[in-house]
Image: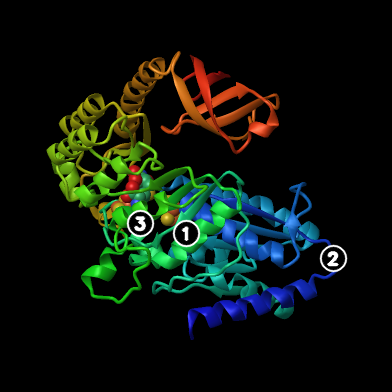
Amino acid sequence: MKISKEIEQQKQYIEKVKELNKDKKLTYSILTMGCQQNENDSEKLCGMIEQMGYVKATNPEEVDLAVINTCCVRENAEDRLFGKLGELKHLKEKRGTIVAIGGCMMQEKHITRKIKESYPFVDMLFGTHTLHKFPEDLYRVIEEKNKLTDILDIEGKVYEGLPIKRDSSVKASVTIMNGCNNFCSYCIVPYVRGRERSRMPKDIMEEIKELAKQGYKEITLLGQNVNSYLRVERENNIQFEEYEGINSFATLLHAINKVDGIERIRFVSPHPKDFTDDVIEQIAKCDKVCKLIHLPLQSGSTEVLRVMNRKYTKQQYLNLVEKMKTRIPNLTLSTDIIVGFPGETEEDFEDTLDVVKKVHFEQVYMFIYSRRIGTPGDKMEKQIPDEIKHKRFNRLKELVESQIAENNQKYINTIQKVLVEGKSKNNENMLTGRTDSNKVVIFEGKDDLINEIINLKIVSEHMWYLRGKQV
Ligand code: SAH
Ligand code: SF4
Ligand code: F3S
């Protein structure tokens, strides 16, 4: 069936559920456990759910539809899901709440088996490739009062035209590609998200222009490997319609940079191996592209990188950083690092510390290696004992925090352009925003500054945020 027809069908189910729910004043909750792409999927779920007549619950005890959008990139997510299911059981018994679980973890058979066996009260399981069918699945659960599993093993298509309820009115995420073809040996994502496939340039541009019209100032482009946007299509001669000259990630940046109203463009995650010169050139040239670039390192050891299947060496990574620093004025970098990958020796770990010392990252997201069933890493022999993993993690954390503290000092007394996002969560009297380099800045100001880019003088630093003053 054509995609537009499938979506049309789902819109009819939205109407049907809305009719069933008429005059009932039903509420929903959603728990999002994963990455920004998972969050973007949740925004689409919320869009569909709200059109079906549910409003967001304000009291966690009074929920009629509870949705969990899962992640399985690391083990702790599983503990969290099963903990949450324990809580929902009581809600189900008390109120008959419909419980629906979706997302990446549902693509793992051992997990869905466990849920069916140990948590039989769950009404609905849906995967990453069947998100768009949520209205139909929910309709069947309500009408037929059956438990339902709707999970596709093969990768889905790229669906356009789903309703969406965005979390922020200042910044918006736009998924530009789904899936991943890289198969880093520690990572579960390619197995649960399927093969890489890009959205069409016209669909992306129309979404961004619409966002600009609605007043959004910042756009974050999402994908597991954004800088290989449209590569699979180009390499396999898959026909796609060029639009505004877009046929690659670099040309996409160029086109978005011209959209009136959009002031900032970010993207996550690029892969170092795909950081071609045309992308570097566009980052430098496009004034709206933020100069904080996320460049996942994972390990600083060439041998570990080889076993991880990352396709670059320590030196190649450092060379790329050097090249980017010379060509992109005011560049700052953030990264992801895994500690304790199988076979990581003390020497390997010191190579990671060495890269961190040399690059001076603005932000480092640090993870302890977590075995994922079905990945090559899980079957590797030289697993690192937990104690060593934790010790190394703490050593890395200490280094990173000392660098961040030092780096924060550089901001003091500078003037930063800050996009004001809203009231500070911890202090109602303060506003919060972010610099180009994605640092949080808290300051005193009037509400009408929200969604404006303003100049702030940085007056103090507090590890995870800066204090600013209007100038
Ligand atoms: N596609 C993105 C993000 C992948 S998941 C990228 O390549 O950067 C986000 C991060 O989780 C990864 O960058 C990696 O650092 C971490 N990660 C993935 N699998 C992991 C595992 N098995 N154990 C620990 N950390 C992991
Ligand atoms: Fe996972 Fe590697 Fe793909 Fe990122 S690039 S999603 S780390 S396999
Ligand atoms: Fe997690 Fe899936 Fe994102 S596994 S990190 S939610 S792609």
Given residues 267 and 80, the one toward you in this image is 267
As helix, strand or loop, the secondary structure at mark 3 comes to helix
* Residue, disc 1: 105
Residue at (39% x, 47% y) in the render: 267
Given residues 6 and 346, the one toward you in this image is 6
Are there few (<14), some (14-19), or many (20+) residues within 10 Å of tag 2?
few
Query: Mark 2 touching mark 3, by CB under 8 A?
Result: no
Given residues 95 and 457, the one toward you in this image is 457
Tell me which label, 2 or 3, sits earlier in the chain.
2
Given residues 196 and 61, the one toward you in this image is 196
Q: Which mark is in front, 2 or 3?
A: 3
Q: Is residue 421 visible?
A: yes
The alpha-carbon separation of the residues under discs 1 and 3 comes to 31 Å
Q: Quadrant of residue 287?
A: top left
* Residue, disc 3: 252
Query: Mark 1 touching mark 2, by CB under 8 A?
Result: no
Are there few (<14), some (14-19), or many (20+) residues within 10 Å of tag 1?
many
Amino acid beneath label 2 = Lys
As helix, strand or loop, the secondary structure at mark 2 comes to loop
- Is the shortest distance between ligand 3 and the CB of mark 1 under 8 Å? yes
Amino acid beneath label 1 = Met
Residue at (36% x, 16% y) in the render: 406
Amino acid beneath label 3 = Leu
The alpha-carbon separation of the residues under discs 2 and 3 comes to 45 Å
Up-down: is 454 above or below 264? above
As helix, strand or loop, the secondary structure at mark 1 comes to helix
Up-down: is 465 above or below 39? above
Query: Which numbered tag is attached to residue 24?
Result: 2
- Is the shortest distance between ligand 3 and the CB of mark 2 under 8 Å? no
